[in-house]
Image (cartoon, rainbow, N blue to C red):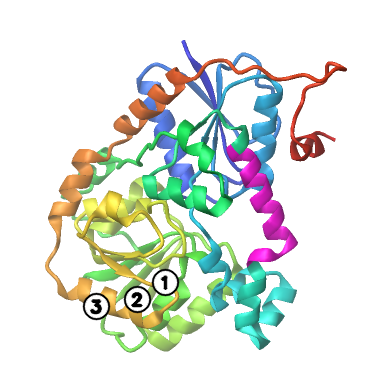
């Protein structure tokens, strides 16, 4: 029996996100195929006895590169699910800088927002993160991006065209059982309005852009707005609450277990995800399956997942967000998107593609120098120092 170890960022379960859902559902689907799949969030666990190491998420590369280096040092095949999208638009956005940057960046953004946006992608912190991510891409024996658009985004951002030859696109899936279980439920979850509403599900943080969504709909308080998610930045949550008090008719719901979300999706007329990076946005897929019209950011693999059945917005432009949300609100439901997603995007299909990628791997050899020590890149050597 093939024995696989899944690895992810250390706070995967404390701050659950799309990578958490993708990892957990891929594991469940592989277990149904009688693979042995464990999960470890440690940076350098004991990996003896495993056949393959599968690491998720290069956007937390300063941690995850150590997991990759640990696999290479042990001579085990390394599979990488990047879950990446170019974050430079976010790094240049005044709201993201103001609430997401360290204090020097916040001060600079408050005085010279355009200059702060130009500097943000070139800080030492950003350079370290990008260098570690590039190292992960190089070390991996197989890459499993969620879309062809994600693959090309990685190639262009890191200037690594050679990785195309080891990439297999594995599209995300829908948890059909949960959506079907709540399809006919008459129970309305506590803390949300009874009438239809605009909904955003996702961590409350600058990249997800809840503040600009609230501001975009300030002049339309007649439309209930529901924000569901765990806050990751107290200052940003406070800013959102202040904007919500000005707008009115805005509801904040703390993080809910994933299997409770379909009941919340089902009562939404529109789901909007105006974030600066999504690959592709599991919340959008689940909301569409539950019958909501969907507004998505232009930063993501829109065509491969949603075609022309969604409304697109520029997350950096409140007018664009407002226009797309109001158009989706006034339009009849587009049930064809949900039906297509349920049919074509399943975790079992994702598991089949993942397993096929595993089977194409062969045990890798680790080169040695004249003294018999393993030969690694300078970055990996530094991580083991």
Q: For mark 3, give the secondary structure.
A: helix
Q: CA distance from mark 3 to mark 2?
A: 9 Å
Q: Can the viewer see residue 191?
A: yes
Residue at screen point 46% across, 33% down: 165
Q: Quadrant of residue 377?
A: top right
Q: Of the two numbered discs 1 and 3 on the same chain, state the one appearing first in sequence.
A: 1
Magenta residues, start to end: 121-137
Q: Is residue 39 above or below residue 299?
A: above
What residue did someone put label 3 on? 326
Q: For mark 1, give the secondary structure.
A: loop
Residue at screen point 59% across, 66% down: 233
**Numbered label attached to residue 153:** none
- Would you say the residues marked 1 and 2 are in contact, meaning their CB atoms lie under 8 Å apart? yes
- Would you say the residues marked 1 and 3 are in contact, meaning their CB atoms lie under 8 Å apart? no
**Label 1, residues with CA under 10 Å away: few <14, some 14-19, many ≥20:** many
Residue 328 within the segment the image draws in magenta: no
What residue did someone put label 1 on? 315
Query: Does residue 85 appear left or right of residue 220 in this picture?
Result: right
């Amino acid at each position: 029996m093939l024995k696989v170890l899944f690895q992810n960022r250390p706070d995967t379960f404390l701050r659950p996100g799309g990578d958490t859902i993708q990892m957990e559902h891929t594991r469940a689907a592989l277990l149904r195929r009688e693979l042995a799949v464990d999960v470890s969030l440690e940076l350098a666990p004991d990996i003896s006895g495993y056949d393959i190491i599968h690491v998720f998420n290069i956007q937390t590369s300063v941690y995850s590169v150590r997991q990759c280096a640990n696999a290479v040092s042990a001579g085990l095949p390394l599979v990488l699910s990047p879950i990446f999208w170019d974050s430079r638009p976010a790094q240049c956005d005044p709201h993201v800088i103001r609430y997401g940057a360290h204090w020097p960046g916040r001060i600079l953004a408050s005085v010279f927002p355009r200059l702060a946006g130009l500097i943000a992608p070139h800080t030492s912190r950003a350079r370290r993160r990008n260098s570690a991510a590039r190292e992960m891409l190089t070390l991996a024996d197989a890459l499993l991006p969620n879309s062809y658009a994600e693959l090309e985004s990685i190639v262009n951002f890191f200037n690594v065209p050679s990785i195309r030859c080891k990439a297999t696109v594995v599209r995300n899936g829908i948890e059909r059982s949960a959506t079907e279980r709540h399809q006919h439920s008459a129970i309305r979850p506590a803390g949300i309005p009874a009438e239809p509403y605009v909904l955003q599900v996702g961590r409350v943080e600058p990249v997800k852009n809840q503040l600009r969504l609230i501001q975009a709909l300030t002049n339309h308080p007649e439309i209930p707005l529901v924000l569901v998610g765990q806050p990751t930045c107290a200052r940003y949550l406070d800013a959102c609450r202040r904007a919500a008090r000005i707008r009115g008719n805005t509801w904040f719901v703390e993080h809910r277990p994933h299997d409770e979300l379909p009941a919340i999706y089902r009562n939404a007329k529109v789901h909007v995800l105006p974030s600066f990076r999504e690959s592709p946005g599991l919340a959008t897929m689940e909301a569409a399956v539950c019958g909501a019209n969907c507004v998505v950011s232009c930063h993501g693999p829109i065509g491969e997942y949603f075609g022309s059945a969604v409304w697109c917005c520029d997350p950096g432009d409140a007018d664009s967000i407002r226009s797309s949300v109001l158009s989706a609100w006034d339009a009849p439901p587009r049930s064809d998107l949900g039906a297509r997603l349920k049919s074509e995007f399943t975790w079992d299909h994702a598991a089949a593609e993942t397993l096929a990628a595993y089977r194409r791997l062969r045990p890798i050899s680790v080169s040695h120098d004249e003294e018999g020590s393993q030969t690694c890149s300078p970055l990996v050597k530094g991580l083991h120092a």
